[in-house]
Amino acid sequence: MFSIEQFRYGADNLGYLVHGGGEAMAVDGGAAEEIRAFVRDRGLALRYVTNTHGHGDHTPGNAALLRSSCAALLEPATLSRKPEPVALGRGRIDVIPTPGHSRDSIVFTTGAAAITGDTLFNFTIGNCFTGDLDAFHASIRALMALPDETLVYAGHDYVRDSLAFAARLEPGNPEIARCLARYDPRHVVSTLADERRVNPYLRFDEPSIVALLESRGLEIATERDRWRSLMTIG
């Protein structure tokens, strides 16, 4: 139903254009000129400009995109409080509130893909700037409920560093090398199945991760304990 175009800007930021049925929505559109050119060349109508959260490195393209179109701005803080689907073309984009990295963090899902911002990166997660580890745990749990084939489109390209960290924690995990071999900086994506096999922050119930935490003298009695223990490892 929807196609997703990825645009790199800054050192490692990733922005997106979701489009279908002749209409489009820009998400974290820092690459405003490239997005405008794509919209113009494909004859699309830019209906919405929005963000996965309100941090300044995700919003620099908003003003330019709004100024050059009739698009409406969808504020992430509003969407997080009232997560109604966004109608676009002949389909809809669902919104999942994911507080943790920020209070207004949200994830957009199209069915086939999730635009996860700084909540879930490819093979790691964002910093918990809110300090609310329990809310962040619930957010990650909500994303883990998505199908394995869901494509994960994150807010930054941290793939090499994330996989290097995962390899330090689990040097015997063969999936890490496989994911690194598939990495393409021109199109940064993973599947939720990849994340379940590699991302330590989604694997708090895996025996190897539990053993790692125990070997470091960290709490492992409950899932909440294991999550909080993982968040102390850097």
Image (tube, helix red, strand yellow):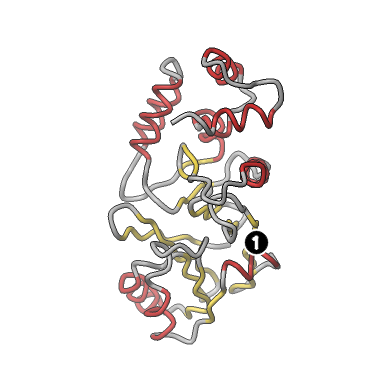
* Quadrant position of residue 72: bottom right
Name of the residue lying farthest toward the left:
11
Residue nearer the viewer, 22 or 85: 85
Q: Amino acid at mark 1?
A: Asp
Residue nearer the viewer, 55 or 131: 131
**Residue 153, percent from left and from top:** 47, 51
Describe residue 146's horizontal placement relative to residue 125 as left or right: right
Q: Please name the residue shown 68% across and 67% down the image.
A: 85
Describe residue 224's horizontal placement relative to residue 69 as left or right: right
Residue nearer the viewer, 181 or 138: 138
Task: Relative to 39, say whether 168 is above or below.
Answer: above
Q: Please name the residue shown 53% across and 52% down the image.
A: 116
Q: If the image is split into quadrants, where does the N terminus sit?
A: bottom right
Secondary structure under tag 1 reads strand
Q: If the image is split into quadrants, where does the C terminus sit?
A: top left
Q: Please name the residue shown 64% across and 41% down the image.
A: 137
**Residue 7, percent from left and from top:** 36, 60
Task: Relative to 211, say whether 190 is above or below.
Answer: below
Name the residue tied to disc 1.
Answer: 94
Image mark count: 1
Task: Relative to 159, say whether 42 is above or below.
Answer: below
**Residue 8, percent from left and from top:** 33, 58
Report crowding for label 1: few under 14, some 14 to 19, many 20 or more residues within 10 A (C-alpha). Answer: some
**Residue 209, percent from left and from top:** 56, 21
